[in-house]
Amino acid sequence: MAWGDLVYEPDHLSAFVLVTIVLGGGAAWLTGRAIALTWRPWWQLVFYSLMLAAAERFFNFALFDGTLPSTYYYALGSLLTLTFGFVGLRITRSRQMQRQYGVLLHKE
């Protein structure tokens, strides 16, 4: 098994980049941002990220002839989706905190 096979399915590098990183990562980023903007708890991102990862697996299967019941690639997609989502959540939440509570940081 080659190193690339651990990250993406054989002969599907472009599908991995397009579906998992660009589309799935972008959707996860926006999901994390939406959760932060509505002041919801961070753990809701986990549920939404797992659903996004399942949709990524389906798109890889339906559009690029990937394997649908692949636990390994689903876990990898879930990890990447969670990562993008948490980064989007943290950046948005920190901007919210700076904007709303910035006065507390400038006390003398």
Image (tube, rainbow, N blue to C red):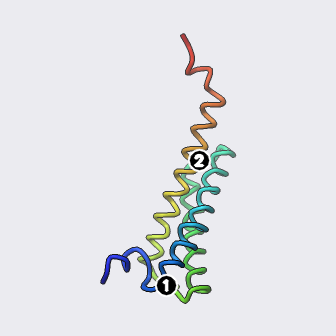
Q: Look at the numbered discs 1 and 2 and tell me whether their residues touch, using CB distance below 8 Å.
A: no
Kind of residue at disc 2: Pro
Of 62 and 70, nearer the camera is 62
Q: Is residue 54 above or below residue 98?
A: below
Q: Percent from the top left, x then y, of residue 9?
A: 44, 82
Tag in front: 1 or 2 = 1
Kind of residue at disc 1: Pro
Residue at the image point whose x is 61% and y is 37% from the top: 95
Callout 2: 10 Å neighbours few (<14), some, many (20+)?
few
Q: Is residue 30 above or below residue 2?
A: above
| Residue ranking furthest to the front | 14
Callout 1: 10 Å neighbours few (<14), some, many (20+)?
few
Q: In screen coordinates, is 81 left or right of 5?
A: right
Quarter location, residue 65:
bottom right
Q: Percent from the top left, x then y, of residue 25?
A: 56, 63
Q: Percent from the top left, x then y, of residue 82?
A: 51, 59
| Residue ranking furthest to the top | 108
Residue at the image point whose x is 57% and y is 74% from the top: 56
**Residue at which label 1 appears:** 69
Quarter location, residue 75:
bottom left
Quarter location, residue 2:
bottom left
**Residue at which label 2 appears:** 41
Of 40 and 78, nearer the camera is 78
Figure quadrant of the C terminus: top right
Q: The residue tagged with tag 1: helix, strand or loop?
A: loop
